[in-house]
Image (spheres, rainbow, N blue to C red):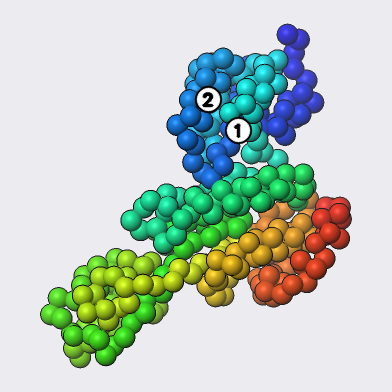
């Protein structure tokens, strides 16, 4: 095959195929639907690597499976093969990137079904907004608890499940060994004058204490709420995501995500990450927009507008 042109490399990069340095081959990113592959899907990925790549697969930090060493002329065949297994290549460009999630679905610390939420976001936004051009990449992460294994606070939009302790002091027996104090990983609970007390400035609302008090001074059921982070980045430029000023309900998450995307598209300059836009315009301005309906009312107008140039 004749030498690849820059235009050829750029074209397939937009399809999820990244040039392997010093070769005419590419690594193709295959996306899981909810941060999870089934056994049959992994078998198909392995077969794709054997047929069209060099037999190797590398998993990325965003949980995609990269089939390594695909010759340029085999890219279309690899795409068609994976489509038969119900999977797609992608995950590049100035758009929504692959959605990541921790294993909160099965983890003992998980406060909700993280992988189900990730799949819903994947279907509604990664696929549903596939043709929406954004100012820059936009990363979404779903975390089940404040252990933050998937680092929601370092994504453009991070979701983290929390459980706020429901404490009834009248039920507290002042046990010599308080099970809540013993289990609390951040030592936010201690006995004061024969009663348990919570230091709210220390408590992470992780949910570990739920169900641990034998006398139910701490409720055995606690509704999951969510901390949302916006504008986090990691790499050459690091920025901790801005936490919204209050926890939100599950019903609020998707409208907030959509409004964040719309605000980003309307306000960010070309090649400016969300965090940079927030720092330039202001956290209070963003939060005010996210907790109003103005952006959703102007959705079609915003989506049809051109990206701002500096």
The answer to whether one can see residue 7 in this image is yes
Residue 2, placed above or below residue 278: above
Q: Observer-nearest residue: 46 or 57? A: 46
Label of residue 99 in the image: none
When asked about the image quadrant of residue 242, the answer is bottom right
Q: Quadrant of the N terminus?
A: top right
Q: Which residue bears the numbered disc 1? A: 87
Q: Indicate the secondary structure of the residue bearing disc 1.
A: loop
**Label 2: how many residues lie within 10 Å, few (<14), some (14-19) or many (20+)?**
some
Would residue 306 appear left or right of 191 to someone viewing this image?
Answer: right
C-alpha gap between disc 2 and disc 1: 9 Å
Q: Residue at x 42, y 52 (%)?
A: 105
Would residue 46 appear left or right of 95 to someone viewing this image?
Answer: left
Q: Earlier in the sequence, mark 2 or mark 1?
A: 2
Q: Quadrant of the C terminus?
A: bottom right
Q: How far from the left and from the top, in percent, is residue 83?
A: 64, 28
**Label 1: how many residues lie within 10 Å, few (<14), some (14-19) or many (20+)?**
some
Q: Please count the marks in the image.
A: 2
When asked about the image quadrant of residue 52, the answer is top right
Q: Which residue bears the numbered disc 2? A: 44
Q: How far from the left and from the top, in percent, is residue 21?
A: 61, 22
Pointers 2 and 1 in contact (CB under 8 A)? yes
Q: Indicate the secondary structure of the residue bearing disc 2.
A: helix
Residue 75, placed above or below residue 177: above
Q: How far from the left and from the top, in percent, is residue 194?
A: 18, 88
Q: Residue at x 60, y 44 (%)?
A: 98
Would residue 143 appear left or right of 258 to someone viewing this image?
Answer: left
Q: Residue at x 55, y 29 (%)?
A: 66
Residue 89, placed above or below residue 260: above
Q: Residue at x 57, y 17 (%)?
A: 53
Q: Residue furthest left?
A: 176
């Amino acid at each position: 095959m004749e030498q690849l042109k820059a235009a050829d490399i750029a074209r397939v990069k937009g399809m999820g195929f990244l040039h392997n340095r010093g070769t005419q081959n590419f690594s193709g990113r295959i996306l899981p639907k909810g941060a999870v592959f089934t056994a049959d899907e992994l078998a198909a990925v392995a077969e794709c690597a054997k047929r069209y790549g060099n037999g190797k697969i590398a998993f990325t930090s965003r949980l995609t499976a990269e089939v390594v060493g695909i010759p340029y002329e085999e890219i279309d065949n690899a795409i068609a093969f994976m489509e038969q297994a119900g999977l797609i290549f992608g995950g590049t460009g100035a758009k929504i990137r692959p959605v990541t999630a921790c294993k909160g679905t099965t983890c003992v610390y998980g406060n909700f079904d993280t992988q189900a939420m990730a799949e819903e976001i994947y279907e509604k936004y990664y696929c549903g907004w596939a043709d929406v051009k954004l100012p820059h990449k936009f990363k979404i992460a779903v975390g089940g608890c404040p252990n933050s294994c998937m680092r929601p606070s370092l994504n453009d939009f991070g979701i983290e499940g929390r459980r706020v302790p429901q404490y009834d002091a009248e039920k507290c027996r002042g046990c010599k060994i308080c099970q809540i104090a013993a289990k609390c990983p951040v030592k936010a609970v201690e006995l004061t004058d024969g009663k348990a007390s919570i230091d709210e400035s220390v408590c992470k609302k992780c949910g570990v204490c739920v169900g641990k008090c034998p006398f139910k001074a701490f409720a055995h059921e606690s509704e999951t709420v969510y901390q949302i982070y916006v504008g986090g980045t990691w790499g050459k430029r690091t920025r901790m995501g801005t936490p919204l000023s209050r926890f939100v309900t599950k019903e609020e998450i998707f409208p907030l995500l959509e409004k964040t995307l719309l605000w980003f598209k309307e306000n960010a300059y070309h090649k400016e990450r969300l965090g940079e836009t927030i720092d330039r315009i202001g956290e209070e301005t963003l939060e005010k927009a996210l907790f109003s309906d103005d952006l959703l009312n102007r959705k079609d107008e915003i989506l049809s507008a051109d990206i701002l140039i500096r």
